[in-house]
Amino acid sequence: MLHELGDALAIDCGALVELSDAAETLTDGYHWSRSGRYASRQSFDVLALAPAVQHAREDGRPVVVSMERSTDGRAAAARAWLARHSLRSLGIVPVGLDEQPAAAWLLASVRADYDWSEAMIDHLEVLGDVITAALQRRREGPSRDMPRAAPSATRPAASVPPVDDLVGEAATFRSAVARLEQVANTDSTVLLLGETGTGKELFAKALHARGPRRGYPLVSVNCAALPPTLIESELFGHQRGAFTGAVAPRQGRFELAHRGTLFLDEIGDLPLDLQAKLLRVLQEGAFERVGSSQTQTVDVRVIAATHRDLPRAVAEGTFRADLYYRLSVFPIRLPPLRERREDIAALVWSIVRKRQKSFRRDVHIVPESVMETLRQHTWPGNVRELENVIERALIHSTGVTLALLDPPAVSDDPSTERGATLTSVERAHIQDVLQECGWRINGLGNAAERLGLHPNTLRFRMKKLGIVRREPVHPPRAIHSPAESRSRERAS
């Protein structure tokens, strides 16, 4: 932060020091100096500056020390410090949320005429208040004296969900979270795969928040929500006059995400002609705005997401193979809700906690009959559908007990669990063909030939889609008692 502050204010060195009642116990917490100017931390030997810092602390106002101005005795040591380090101007800005300042900025410049403007001082005070409050909270940690409410018997044992809303303990879901933890603290491209409503955007936010670029912006763009004629401008920006309505230059999402993360949702819907340009940015970090020949360079981490079957799109020629391989450096599959029904209770409580305040509700009880109804539903809309059901229930409920409004239908037809996604339709079609062929893959007229696939390709698809033959290979032979066998022989 001090480095960014130094660049923004054009200063040559800076520090944030903590203040105490005694000048000799001044704590030198954080340093920064412009590259190459100082070889050691000795540029901020704070004891030499203690009298001037304590002066600022007592007055509660900024103090500016300049080599070109006459100063009182309390600044003599600070002037000597400036001369020793070939600096000409020093600003000391006390900060802190309490009446007595808790810390101070020490900022110095080689320029004697450095402008310590009132606006800059105001910004430093606000920023300092935020920083010192955060440092104090981190140092104190959670209070041990805070009373804790006894857990309600009707609430689940698990308490507040994680801040990133990644709620669930199902094996399939924890596997996805484990992969997220593995790749989060890198700059690798991540491809999030899963049906609509499984939480791909939440995973993208968690990846950014836990990654090395969390101090920079997370910029999102939905490739399916924009007309093809506007997607290029949204991604790469445009110059004035590039097309009708382009009355001023505009930055694209890649430029806005510089040094941060760009989340490309529904990447499978990106038009084919833009896929080559996207591939170039991913490989070289370079692109041109619409209507410009000047190359722009960016440093962006890309997280992509789609509900489509990209290998099939590659086979059909609607998605570039080289872009697919560039995006799928580290794929993470998010399971649909029907594969993690044991998480429904935790998800319901998480949604209730987040939403009930806005509806002025105070729900403490979710009946087991309600939970069972929710577990039996097939959830083609996944967690997003569950959120809508619980939101309607909160509006409908007037007491402390959650009551469903229009409970979701319970279906015993396994075909309804297939949903309407391309992956589920493909799984159902392959299963139907395999059953019609008696689960024979090779040979004329058998499953691979009927599907137009190489047998090894079909086996790979079956493994990827989780298609397993569950009925026995041979029908069970009837077992009869000896008396029944003799009677059958006489009858024959």
Image (cartoon, grey):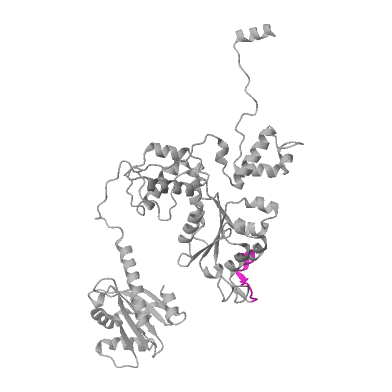
Which residue appears farthest toward the top when viewing the image?
490
In percent of width and height, residue 74 lies at 25, 86
Question: Is residue 312 among the parts visible in the rendering?
Answer: yes
Magenta-tinted stretch: 278-293
Question: Is residue 258 among the parts visible in the rendering?
Answer: no
In percent of width and height, residue 118 lies at 34, 83
Q: In the shown orientation, is residue 29 left or right of residue 376?
A: left
Q: Quadrant of the N terminus?
A: bottom left
**Where 122 sits versus 216, above or below?**
below
Which residue appears farthest toward the right when viewing the image?
444
Residue 10: quadrant of the picture = bottom left
Q: Quadrant of the C terminus?
A: top right
Q: Residue at x 38, y 52 (%)?
A: 355
Q: In the shown orientation, is residue 140 left or right of residue 332?
A: left
Q: Residue at x 60, y 64 (%)?
A: 231
**Where 435 sits versus 389, above or below?**
above
Front position in the image: 372 or 26? 372
Front position in the image: 200 or 300? 200
Front position in the image: 417 or 144? 417
In percent of width and height, residue 451 lies at 71, 42
Residue 483: quadrant of the picture = top right
In percent of width and height, residue 157 lies at 35, 44
**Count of numbered marks:** 0
Q: Is residue 210 magenta?
A: no
Q: Is residue 282 magenta?
A: yes
Q: In the shown orientation, is residue 400 left or right of residue 298?
A: left
